[in-house]
Image (cartoon, rainbow, N blue to C red):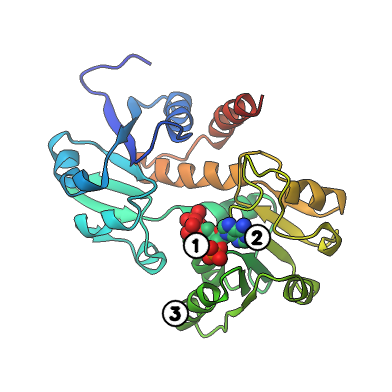
């Protein structure tokens, strides 16, 4: 599509942003939807983050994605933050409506959509989540809000405990926690319906690592990995071999982007076109 004087601008801020998948994915989405938008990457240092909101207003940028290391710091520069993003404590999407900047978190809703698309409805399900970092916060609040019974396992058990208490505090439901150790994994997984890895274990170049031994995986388990490089992590390969349903990290990436697209444009996201763009790029990266 031709860029004209009317073309609306969206983008991503982060440091670094050079290897972000979002420009390829969002430009493919704008094209597929026939929208006169363009999406670019802005490398923004932490020192200049406080000028970002002013710049967005000045240049009338319609929306931004926010990535590492600005997801937390950007919050105080906004006019308002959506309640879910406030709970999660991080913003990954900003919408600029006539100079008023509102922050959202689409990572959690994106993860939920990836589950729903795979036919998994988490209400009443027992979910074991590995990890207690930033990605884990988005997943934890979203699945707890959807009525799942959550247990958090983390290498540093005090982080799992803190997150479990925080999430429990927002609901009647008790959230469990334990150290990420073999015996605990065995016990918690025996009763679980879903296993979600939010740790970086298994991420390229450490592709031989897995956060969960293969012997604990079963066919009646749904296994999700938020790692998307490689596309099929060792965890997912072993889960598949055990006959489990699997959901790869690219699906969460695609659906968080789809939700952001909808917040900026008000149009249903062309998810298939976004998936094609991401898969092409990731398959190329693996080769
Ligand atoms: P993100 O924002 O991507 O979630 P993060 O906040 O740095 O990143 O969190 C990384 C998560 O991966 C944490 O849960 C971390 O465990 P700790 O809290 O104990 O550090 C987990 N993690 C990273 N490397 C790990 C490893 N080798 N074994 C187990 N857990 C690991």
Q: CA distance from mark 2 to mark 1?
A: 13 Å
Q: Secondary structure at mark 2?
A: strand
Q: Residue at x 19, y 44 (%)?
A: 48
Up-down relation of residue 245 to residue 28 (above or below): below
Task: Check the image and report above or below for 142 versus 257.
Answer: below
Q: Position of residue 161 (x, y in %)?
A: 53, 79
Q: CA distance from mark 1 to mark 3?
A: 18 Å
Q: Residue at x 55, y 72 (%)?
A: 144
Q: Nearer the viewer, residue 26 or 138?
A: 138
| N-terminal-most mark, 1 or 3 | 1
For disc 2, the marked residue is 196
Tell me which numbered mark, 2 or 1, is placed earlier along the sequence. 1
Marks 3 and 2 close (CB-CB < 8 Å): no
Q: Quadrant of residue 166?
A: bottom left
Identify the element where label 3 is drawn. Answer: loop
Task: Kindly tell me whether mark 1's CB lies below 8 Å from ligand 1.
Answer: yes
Q: Which residue is mark 3?
A: 170
> CB under 8 Å between callouts 2 and 1?
no
Please tell me which residue lies in front, 184 or 87.
Answer: 184
Q: Nearer the viewer, mark 1 or mark 3?
A: 1
Q: Quadrant of residue 272?
A: top right
Residue 76 image point, x, y percent = 22, 60
- Image x and y of residue 212, in percent: 74, 60
In which quadrant of the rendered image does the N terminus lie?
top left
């Amino acid at each position: 599509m031709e860029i004209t004087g009317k073309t609306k601008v969206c983008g991503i801020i982060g440091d670094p942003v050079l290897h972000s998948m979002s420009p390829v994915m969002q430009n493919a989405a704008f094209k597929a939807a026939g929208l006169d938008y363009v999406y670019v990457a802005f490398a923004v240092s932490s020192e200049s983050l406080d000028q970002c909101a002013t710049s967005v207003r000045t240049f009338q940028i319609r929306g931004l994605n926010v990535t590492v290391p600005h997801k937390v710091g950007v919050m105080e520069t906004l006019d308002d933050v959506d309640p879910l993003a406030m709970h999660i404590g991080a913003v990954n999407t900003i919408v600029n409506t006539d100079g008023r900047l509102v922050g959202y978190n689409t990572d959690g809703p994106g993860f939920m959509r990836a589950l729903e698309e795979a036919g998994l409805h988490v209400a009443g399900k027992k979910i074991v989540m590995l990890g207690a970092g930033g990605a884990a916060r988005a997943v934890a609040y979203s699945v707890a809000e959807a009525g799942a019974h959550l247990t958090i396992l983390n290498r540093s058990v005090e982080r799992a405990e803190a997150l479990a208490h925080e999430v429990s505090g927002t609901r009647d439901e008790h959230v469990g926690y334990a150290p990420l150790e073999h015996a605990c994994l065995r016990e918690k997984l025996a009763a679980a319906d879903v296993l979600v890895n939010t740790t970086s274990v298994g991420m390229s170049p450490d592709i031989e690592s897995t956060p969960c031994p293969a012997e604990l995986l079963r066919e009646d388990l749904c296994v999700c990995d938020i790692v998307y490089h490689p596309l099929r992590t060792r965890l997912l390969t072993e889960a598949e071999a055990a006959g489990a349903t699997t959901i790869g990290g690219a699906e969460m990436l695609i659906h968080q982007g789809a939700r952001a697209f909808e917040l900026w444009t008000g149009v249903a996201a062309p998810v298939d076109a976004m998936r094609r763009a991401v898969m092409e790029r990731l398959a190329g990266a693996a080769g």
